[in-house]
Structures are given as C-alpha cells and as structure tokens.
Image: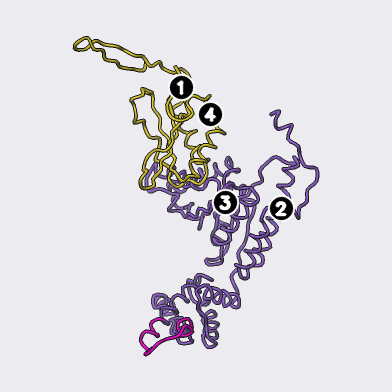
C-alpha cells in the first residue's frame, strides 16, 4: 500500500514516443501490408490501438485504474480474414501490455463443450488455462448456444466463459467470431456476452479486384505466377465462383489456386518431353484455371439439389 | 514441526507473487507444471496425489495459479507442492519441486528406536 503511494507518476506523456516505443507501429504496418482491402477493419483497429495507447498513458498517470474491457466480436462471412486479424490483434495487445504473452488459442464448440455430464467444465477450463496471458479466439461462437435443446452442455461452457471474462480481465482477452446475423441472434439470447464485449468489428466481403490481388499475393509467396491469359481467366473465375454456393472469399481462392497448381503439375508431367526451365515450372496458364468445374456450372453435389429445386 | 523438502523449504513460505514468478521460470525453461498434494508428509512418502493432469501446454503462470487456488480450496489442510517436469530425452524427470501450501498445524516427525539381533539398533520415523 505505502509502496504504491511512493511510485512517482509521470506528469506529461509523449504519445508519439509511446507509439514508437511500444512497437504498435510495426503491427499496424504489418496489417496494412499483409491484408488487402478490409479498410473499415483497419480503421477500427487503428482506433482501438489509439484508444488503448491513450488509456495506457492515463493509467500510468494515475487517472484511471480499471483495466478496460477488451473482449471483442468479429463478424463477417467465412474467409474474410477474421483469424488473421485476431492473431495480429493478439500481437497488438501484447505490445501495448494488455496481455502478458500475446499468443492466440483458436477454438470451436468441440474444444469447449463435452459429450456427457461433468465433461464440459474441465474441458472449458483446460482451454482457458492454455489461453491465459493471451487471446482466446472462439470461431463460430453461436454454436455454443442451442436454443432448441435446453439440456445442451453448451450453456455450461457459456457460464464458465462469462465468469472468466468478468473476473480475469487482466489475464485474457476473448474474441468471438462468426456470421453477422447468427452472432446477433447469439448475443440477444445471451445478453451477458453483449455487455461484456466492448468492440464489435465487422468484416466486409472482398471485392473481385481485391480477390484477384489476393490470389496474386498468394502465388507470389509460393513463387508461382499467372500468365496474362490465366489472369483474365482468374478474374472470370472469381465472378462466377461468387455466385455459386459455399463461397468463402479468400479461402475459396486459396483452394482454387491449390487445384490449379495440381493441374499445372499434371500438365507438365504428361506434356513435357525434355528439360523444363524455372519459368515453365512456376507459370500457371489459362488452361489450368479454365479446367475448373466452376466454369461448367459448379460442383455436381451442388448442382443436383439446385435442379431438384428448379423442378 | 516444519517439514522441509524440495526447493526453498528453509526459506519463509513463498507468497503468491513469488510462486507465480517461480512458475514463470518453469514455463520459460519449457518444463511441464504439475500440482500434487498429500496429507502424509513422511519423508519416505514419495508419491503424492496428483491434482489434475500435468500441464504441458501452458503459456502463462496464471493457468497453474488457477489450479493451485482450486486445490487449496479443496484441500486447505494438505501439503501441496508444485513440480516441474522436463520431458527432454535424457532428462525425463522432475527438475524442480517446492511446497506451496502447508496445514496450519504441522505434524511432528517422530523417531522410534528398537533393538535388533545382536544388540544392533533400528530406527524408524513416523509423522504424528
């Protein structure tokens, strides 16, 4: 007690200096460089970082004692970069000193909820113990709550989570993620979460142009490139794929590129006679992309029910 | 009588901040933390009861402290110790062990002496 009183508090603060010293700038620069598009998300993260920086300075001056509520919810369609941003957020919070270790523990319902009575609490606690000092990322959080089954064990996990979110605010930050409409329903059924979550960040879908840039960045990272024909085909592919079911933004693009690489390898293997140079090994051509089933109207499994519905 | 076994047992009892710091050290060396408790502090009683599983995937001492607080709540009058296990090949053993909870009233270790063949003597200890 007396030691607290002796601690000398700074009387002025240089925010720019704090900003440099905390390393927040590097995280925000990483965010700008690594994530294409998502400008509303970037803006929100900048605002959050500024708020936390000011709050930290206020606490150092003794103007406030409370740890601010940092739990967040990320809403958006699949493949819009929620997990990636959560990982960066963990780094950001670590640099600002709000979490001690800054690791990300990513879980879904299966990791939290048990299968029989008495199984849920130890399972949830195990995950929470692992996440202490870092960020707990709950993907598709609304699956925790099943309104049609009141004996569902998800409720038990929710209660433990709520308790920890309130009592261990210094020790861990919880980020819940999922589709916007279902998260809204989840929060209105569990008002406890709504009041404990301070930051809601909405992730918009990528535009076609952004997805094309994403596909180029992904290929760059693996030392592949699209030739001109393939780029045009990719553009067309993105527009077509978006209209088909189970479109998952950047994740769909990654899967498409994986399959294109497979077809490229197969093409080289069957057609090539003689030595290949590095350009041939790393170029994806129009045919590799055009062979996709997306151009012939989607997957067969999806086509069948659509036809039935039409009939 | 104050039971002394493991690290730090000749020092005054560690408080929670000091225990947290020790566990941080354990985690930094990438050892697994586990908790054990016992009502029988006899020096030959090597195997104490385990409190939950050893924690192999912790990143922060807070997780172990949560378990410790729960163990204290369930067994306030037991001896509780924190152990650090090194799973590296060649070690695969406990690297560190220290007592973090003692009963308010500690038992005495009593020595009994008995005569044996040919006037030799045998000694035994028991906690009472």
Marks 4 and 1: which is nearer the front?
4
The vertical placement of B91 against A211, above or below, is above
Decide which of B4, A109 is in the foreground and name it.
Answer: B4
Q: Mark 4 highlights which residue?
A: B14
First of labels 4, 1 by sequence position: 4
Proximity of marks 2 and 4: CB atoms separated by less than 8 Å: no
Q: Answer whether residue A249 is magenta in the image.
A: no
- Tell me the shade of chain A: purple
Q: Residue at x 33, y 25 (%)?
A: B44
Mark 4–mark 1 Cα distance, whole angstroms, equals 14 Å
Give the extent of the magenta segment: A265-283
Point out residue A74 in the picture as x, y percentages from the top left corner: 58, 58
Mark 2–mark 4 Cα distance, whole angstroms, equals 38 Å
Q: Answer whether residue A273 is magenta in the image.
A: yes
Describe the element under mark 3 as helix, strand or loop.
loop
Q: Mark 3 highlights which residue?
A: A102
Do the residues at pointers 2 and 1 share their chain?
A: no
């Amino acid at each position: 007690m007396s030691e607290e009183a002796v601690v000398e508090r700074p009387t002025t603060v240089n925010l720019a200096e704090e900003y440099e010293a905390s390393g927040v700038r590097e995280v925000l620069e990483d965010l700008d460089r690594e994530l294409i598009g998502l400008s509303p998300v970037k803006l929100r993260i900048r605002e959050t970082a500024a708020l936390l920086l000011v709050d930290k300075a206020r606490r150092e001056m003794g103007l406030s004692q409370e740890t601010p509520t940092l739990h967040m919810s990320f809403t958006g369609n699949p493949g819009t970069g929620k997990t990636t941003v959560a990982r960066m957020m963990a780094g950001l919070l670590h640099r600002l000193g709000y979490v001690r270790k800054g690791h990300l523990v990513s879980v879904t319902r299966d990791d939290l909820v048990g299968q029989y009575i008495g199984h849920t609490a130890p399972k949830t606690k195990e995950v929470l113990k692992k996440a202490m000092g870092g960020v707990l990322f709950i993907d598709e959080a609304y699956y925790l709550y099943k309104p049609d089954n009141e004996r569902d064990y998800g409720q038990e996990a929710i209660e433990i989570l709520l308790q920890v979110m309130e009592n261990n605010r210094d020790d861990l930050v919880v980020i819940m993620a999922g589709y916007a409409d279902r998260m809204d329903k989840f929060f209105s059924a569990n008002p406890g979460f709504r009041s404990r979550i301070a930051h809601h960040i909405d992730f918009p879908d990528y535009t076609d142009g952004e997805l094309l840039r994403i596909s180029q960045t992904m290929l760059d990272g693996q030392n592949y490139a699209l030739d001109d024909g393939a780029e045009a085909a990719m553009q067309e592919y993105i527009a077509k794929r978006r209209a088909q079911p189970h479109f998952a933004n950047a994740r769909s693009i990654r899967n498409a590129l994986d399959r294109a690489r497979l077809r490229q390898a197969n093409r080289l293997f069957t057609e090539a006679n003689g030595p290949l140079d590095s350009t041939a090994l790393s170029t994806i051509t129009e045919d590799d992309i055009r062979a996709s089933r997306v151009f012939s109207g989607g997957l067969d499994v999806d086509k069948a029910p659509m036809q039935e519905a039409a009939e | 009588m104050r039971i002394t076994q493991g690290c730090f047992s000749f020092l005054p009892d560690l408080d929670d901040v000091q225990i947290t710091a020790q566990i941080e050290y354990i985690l930094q060396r990438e050892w697994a933390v586990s908790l054990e408790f016992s009502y029988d502090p006899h020096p030959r009683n090597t195997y104490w009861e385990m409190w939950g599983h050893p924690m192999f995937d912790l990143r922060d001492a807070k997780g172990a402290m949560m378990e410790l607080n729960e163990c204290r709540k369930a067994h306030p009058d037991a001896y509780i110790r924190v152990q650090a296990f090194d799973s590296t090949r060649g070690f695969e053993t406990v690297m560190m062990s220290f007592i973090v909870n003692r009963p308010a009233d500690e038992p005495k270790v009593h020595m009994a002496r008995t005569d044996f063949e040919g006037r030799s003597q045998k000694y035994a200890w028991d906690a009472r």
